[in-house]
Image (tube, rainbow, N blue to C red):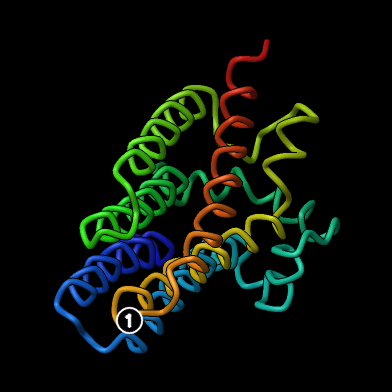
Amino acid sequence: MNKADAVTLFRTFLVFSIVYGILTGFNPWILIAGIILMFVLDAVDGFAAINSASKGRITISKYIRYALGDKDMVAAVSKLKPILKKQSIYGARLDVAGDRITEYAFWLVFMFVGIVPLWLVLALVLRHSFADALMGAKGTSSRMKSGFARMVYGSNAGRFWVGALKALTFSYLVLVHSLGYPLIIGYALITILVIYIMLRGAAEIYESIRS
């Protein structure tokens, strides 16, 4: 197992520890630190894979430039894709699985404690199931070609900000549950996040079924 896959598995394990902490009333600030760490690790596994494929030529500063959409770095990383595939035949799909487990675990625990409604969780399950199945049959989302899909799905920077929004939303919901913070702010964050998730799902499905 390479380093990137090991990081993915570790952050997947971490989410269950955080969920357990939410249910048992563990210190909310430590839980929030864990949430932030978990989403940072989502970027770390990408860096580990790319750094290994480039034999150390892609440094942290260069990876940050790539994550923020620097054209030269995006082009450089694109050339490494054949090497990345050889390093781990299931790396990209394992990363997606880790993302889905993370999302489902948080949505379910906040539904269990009465913050998130069941219908929203079901809608997200349907969105991910259809989009992942269709994109898995055609390829990963990084291969999107249509203008609509690229516009909605966003750049590397867009994916970074949606990760930050997830971390912020789930962290705030921890404070709602543990410390009684205003739920209306939590609903606002949930609304923004879910709208973006649904738009990305529409983009993935559109890209999958277009000729």
Q: Is residue 130 above or below residue 10?
A: above
Query: Where is 170 relative to 191, above or below?
Result: below
Q: Nearer the viewer, residue 3 or 125?
A: 125
Residue nearer the viewer, 48 or 32: 32
What residue is at 30 percent from the left and 74 percent from the top? 177
**Viewer-nearest residue: 140 or 38:** 38
Q: Is residue 205 above or below residue 49?
A: above
Q: Amino acid at mark 1?
A: Leu
Q: In which quadrant of the rendered view does residue 20 lie?
A: bottom left
Left or right of residue 75, residue 188 in this image: left
Q: Quadrant of the N terminus?
A: bottom left
Return the x and y of residue 109 as percentages of the image width and height.
25, 60
- Residue 189 place in picture, x, y as percent: 54, 62
- Count up the numbered dots: 1
Q: Classify 10 Å Cα crowding around label 1: few (below 14), some (14-19), many (20 and above).
A: many
> Residue at position x 82%, y 61% from top?
70
- For label 1, the residue is 31
